Image (cartoon, helix red, strand yellow):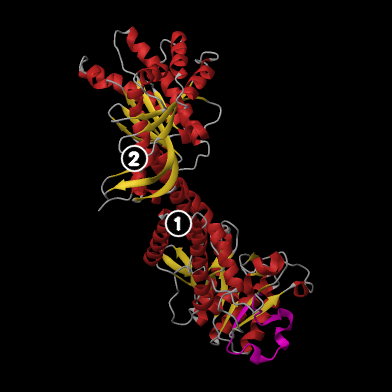
Amino acid sequence: MRVPKLISAMAGRDLWSWVIVIVLFTLVTALVSRPVENLLSDLLSSTSSPFVGKPDGVVVVAIGEDTLKQFPYRSPIDREFLAGVVAAVAKARPKAIGIDILFDQATEPAKDGELARVIAETVAGGVPVVIANAMEEDGLDAKQVEWLNSYAPEAFRGLATLARDRFDGVVREIFPGREEDGQWVAGFTQAMAGYPGQPADTSRRTMVYYRTEHSEPFAFPQYPAESAAFLPAEWFADKYVLIGVDLKLDDRHPTPFIIPNGISAGTLPGVVIHAHLLQQILNGDEVRSLAWPLLAALGSVAAILCWWIAYRPLPILLKPVAITGLLMLVWLIAWLSYSRLAIHVPVVAPTVVIGGVAALLTFLAWKRDSDERRFLQRAFSQYVSPAIVDTIVADPDSLKLGGERRTITCVFTDLEGFTSFSESLAPEEIAGLLNEYLDRMCNLFVEAGATIDKVVGDAVVGFFGAPTDQEDQANQAVGLALAIDRFSEGFRKELAARGMTLGVTRVGIHRGPAIVGNFGGQRFFDYTAIGDTVNTAARLEGANKHIGTRLCVSGPVASSAMGFVFRPIGTIFLKGKHEGIEAFEPVSTVAAHPGGEEAYEKAFALMKEGDPAASEAFSLLAETHHEDALIRFQMYRLSHGATSTDIILGEK
C-alpha cells in the first residue's frame, strides 16, 4: 500500500522537527486541557446535569454565627452544647449522626466528658455516630492525632478531607479515604454510608452536585444547632444528620456552582459538601467517564475525519466550515451525554487535537500543493512555455484533451544549414552549441511573453494569444522577431571569431484563427496550435530562403503591429494556395538608412503598378544598399520579366 505523500513528507529530513512539534503540541495539550476541561465540567455539572430535584434523606444541623454568640469563646466549640445537640437529634432515631468537627484537643474536662458520654450512649442505643478524623499529613501534630484517636472511642471515624483540585481548589471528586499503617481509613461520608456492613468504596469518582432548575446548589434541609432540641422529631427520624459549621470565614470551599452563581454563592460550607457527597453515595448516582479504549477509538475517528477534510482538495472556505462542524458535533455529543446520561465526554483535548491536527495537516497540504506547484513549474518549464505551466498550475483541468478556437500570432524560426554545419564538428561540440543557441532562443520567447509550442531540431515554434489573451500579440511577435534577429546575427559573429560559420536564423510570422489545446492520446499529449495560421507562418519562414530575407511577416501582423517599420515584399502565393498573402519585412529603425525606406516604398509602388521605371528605381537603391537582400531579390525578379508584386513560390 502506498504511503500518502502528506504522511511520507513527515518522514523526510525534517523528521526530528516534526517530532519536536508533536512533543510540544502534546505538552501544550496536556497543560491546557486539564484546567479548561475542569471549567467546562463545572459548567455542565452546575447547569446541565440530570441531577435535578429534591434529594431526601440527609439533614444538616448548622453551627452559625448566631450559635457562637451565646458562648464566651468561638473555638473550640462548646462541647457541652454539642452534647445537647447530639442527644436531641439521637432521640429522633436518625439512621446515623455525623459530626464534621475535629476533636483534636482537650477543652473543659467536664464538657469533654459530657460529649463523650452522650456519644457513647447514642452508639449504645443503636444510632451510629461518625466523628471527623484527620492525620498528621492533614496538618495535625502527633499530640493532636493521639488525643483525637483516644476521644470517644465508641464513635466511628471518617477522614474529613475534601478532594480539592490542586490547580483551582474546587471540590470535584469524592475523597474515599486512604491507607494508614496498612489499614484503610474511610472518608467521612464513606464511613457514614458504609455502616453497617457495607464495604468502603475506595475508588475516586467524580462528585455529583444536586442542583435546582435555575443552576443553584440544592439546599438540603438545614436547621440552626441551637434550635435542635425544639424541632419535631420527624425532621430527623430515619435521616442521616450532619452536624457542622456554616461560617463565612471557616471551612468553606469552592464548587462548580461558582461559574453560574459567582464566588460567594458557589462557595459552600464543608458540611453541605459532605451532604452532597453522602446523598450521592446513598442514591448510587455517579458521573461516568468513557473507557480509554472507546475514547481512543472516537479520537481516531475524529482524527481521520480531520485528516480527510484537511487533505482533500476542498474549496478553501469549506475546510474551516467542515472542521468547525466537526468540533460542534463533538461538543454537542458531550453536552447530550452529560445532560441526559451523566456521561462525561472530554471536549478540550479533542478540540485542541482536532484544531491542531487540522492546522498541521492544512499546513502540510498547503506545503504539499506549494511544493507540487513549484515542482511542476520547474519541471515543465524545462520543456514547455511557463505560460502553459502557469495555466496548468492554476487550473489542472486544463490538461484534458481537446482544444479551443483562438486568434493567435504564430512565430516559426529555423536555423539555415545547421545539418551541414554539424557535420564539420564533433558531436559534443554540436550538442553544446545547439543547447546554447536554443537556450538563448527560448529565453527570448519567454521574455517576450510567448508560449513555446515545440522545439524541433534547431527550430523553435511559438505563439501569442494562448493560453491567455494578449491584446498586443502582434507587437510582441514583431518585437520578438527583431530580438531573435539581433541575437542570431550576434551569435554568428561570436562563432565566426572562433572560426565557425553558422547560417542565418529565419523567422516567419502570421496572425489568424487556430485551434489551441492539448492534442494526442491519454498517455502522451502536447499543448499545441493547429490550423492554417500555423501552416502559413511556417511557409512564410520558408519564403525567406527564396527571397533572401531573414524576417517575413504577413499583412495581418504588419497592420496590427504599431511602432515598427515594415518594407513590403509582395503578394506571396504559397504552394497549394489560390489566394496570395501580403508579406512584409520588419526593419530595425536603428539599422535603417535615413530615407532608404521611403525610396524603397516608391520603387515598390512603381513595380506594383507595372511601371517599367521600377527597374531603374531599384537599380539606384542597389547602388547605396549593396547588402540589402530584399532589394537584390526585387531587381532579380524585374530582370527576369516580373511586372507585378505577385510572387509565386513552388516550395516551402
Residue 484 point in image, percent of width and height: 42, 23
Pair 2/1: label in front: 1
Quarter of the image with the C terminus in it: top left
Q: Which residues are magenta?
A: 216-242
Q: Is 132 a magenta residue?
A: no
Residue 198 point in image, percent of width and height: 44, 80
Q: In the image, what residue type sits under mark 1?
A: Leu
Q: In the image, what residue type sits under mark 2?
A: Gly
Residue 95 in sight from this viewpoint = yes
Q: Is residue 544 above or below residue 473?
A: above
> Contact (CB < 8 A) between labels 2 and 1?
no
Residue 23 in sight from this viewpoint = no
Q: Secondary structure at mark 1?
A: loop
In the foreground, 321 or 433: 433
Q: Quadrant of residue 87?
A: bottom right
Taking the spot 60% from the left edge, 68% from the top edge, the residue there is: 43
In the rendered structure, the answer to whether residue 108 lies left or right of residue 93 reads right
Q: Is residue 405 above or below residue 135?
A: above
Q: Quadrant of residue 506?
A: top left
Decide which of tag 2 and tag 1 comes sooner along the chain.
2
In the foreground, 545 or 505: 545
* Circle 2 residue: 12
Taking the spot 23% from the left edge, 22% from the top edge, the residue there is: 419
Number of the label disc, if any, that sits on residue 314: 1
Residue 466 point in image, percent of width and height: 44, 42
Q: Secondary structure at mark 2?
A: loop
In the foreground, 96 or 579: 579
Crowding at label 1, few (<14), some or many (≥20) Cα neighbours within 10 Å? few
